Amino acid sequence: MLRLAIQKSGRLSEDSLALIRECGINFLSTSYKLKTEATNFPLEILFLRDDDIPGYVKDGVADLGIVGQNVLVEAGYPNLEVETLGFSKCRLSLAVPRADAYPSIEVLQGKNIATSYPNILGRYLAEHGVQANLHTISGSVEIAPSIGLAEAICDIVSSGSTLLGNGLREVETVFRSEAVLIAQPNLTAEQTDLLEQLLFRMQAVRRAKRSKYIVLNAPVSALEEVRRLLPGIKSPTITPLAEAGWVSVQSVVQEDEFWHITSQLKAVGAEGILVLPIEKMIA
């Protein structure tokens, strides 16, 4: 059995549990239990503080973990990373009071900066030749400038609304983060096989989320251009229609290219474009 550690509450926890369910793994989840066991896959899920997960995995208390890259790198264990998961994306950013001038990062030389990520921030400042006084605090970092603790902060940013609400503005992106799957380095052969099975499922789910299934009608005269726009996984499926001179084309298109490609398809004469979600996609 594999033991998987995830954050016990919050958005990362919700997204992690959703991914596990999308992988076809069933389990009972409650608000008061700190662990649960899957009913159809040899997996036990532990609900822990996110800061504790890298250490638990490194020490072998948990075999796997889902955690933010920011937490993993700050803890000093980036070598545990197995797979990026594509959700819980955020950035670690420097911010200063809105009224303060910020010509460049050199303005922070000798200043006080409050952060929960002194290791990541320290490396970033060193790369830019800046020496500052880092004050490590575990929460409510945004309040530090208004109470005189620091002239700047470095904290996790998603939308930026919390910074704005506290009179701050983002001036530097220090680190970009997303959820990652991590694994302890001493898995047995059987556990490694289970990990590969789990990765296979996760990759199929992620691949499907990034793709759309597209069906359209196109004139035969435009077929070569349509095939160029829709290469699909190997090549599109093309079926003649009852109406002479027309074909039906079925293919897969990447989510981030969808609108651009569909406008080009219409421009070459494609009609009746139907777009469908993909539940799972096995490469």
Image (tube, grey):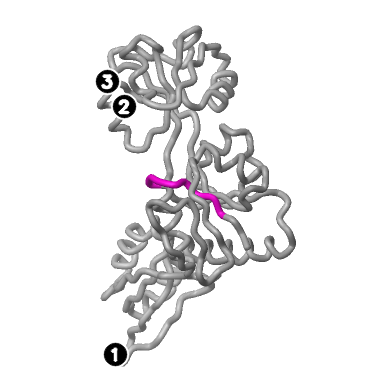
Amino acid type of disc 2?
Answer: Leu
Element carrying mark 1 = loop
Please tell me which residue is depicted at 29% across the width and 72% down the height of the picture.
Answer: 273
Element carrying mark 3 = loop
Which numbered disc, 1 or 2, marks the residue closer to the eye?
2
Residue 225 appears left or right of 234 = left
Element carrying mark 2 = helix
What is the span of residues highlighted in magenta in the rendered image?
4-11
Q: Residues within 10 Å of mark 1 (few under 14, many from 20)?
A: few
Q: In the image, residue 203 lies at what x, y percent?
A: 53, 62
Which residue is at the far top? 110
* Mark carried by residue 276: none
Q: In the image, residue 75 lies at what x, y percent?
A: 59, 33
Query: Which residue does the numbered mark 3 point to in the structure image?
Result: 167
Amino acid type of disc 3?
Answer: Gly
Query: Magenta span has 206?
Result: no
Q: Is residue 133 above or below residue 246?
A: above
Please tell me which residue is depicted at 46% across the width and 70% down the height of the picture.
Answer: 280
Q: Residues within 10 Å of mark 3 (few under 14, many from 20)?
A: some
Please tell me which residue is depicted at 39% across the width and 11% down the height of the picture.
Answer: 149
Please tell me which residue is depicted at 25% across the width and 26% down the height of the picture.
Answer: 165
Nearer to us in this view, 189 or 175: 189
* Mark carried by residue 243: 1
Q: In the image, residue 248 lies at what x, y percent?
A: 36, 82
Query: Which residue does the numbered mark 2 point to in the structure image?
Result: 163
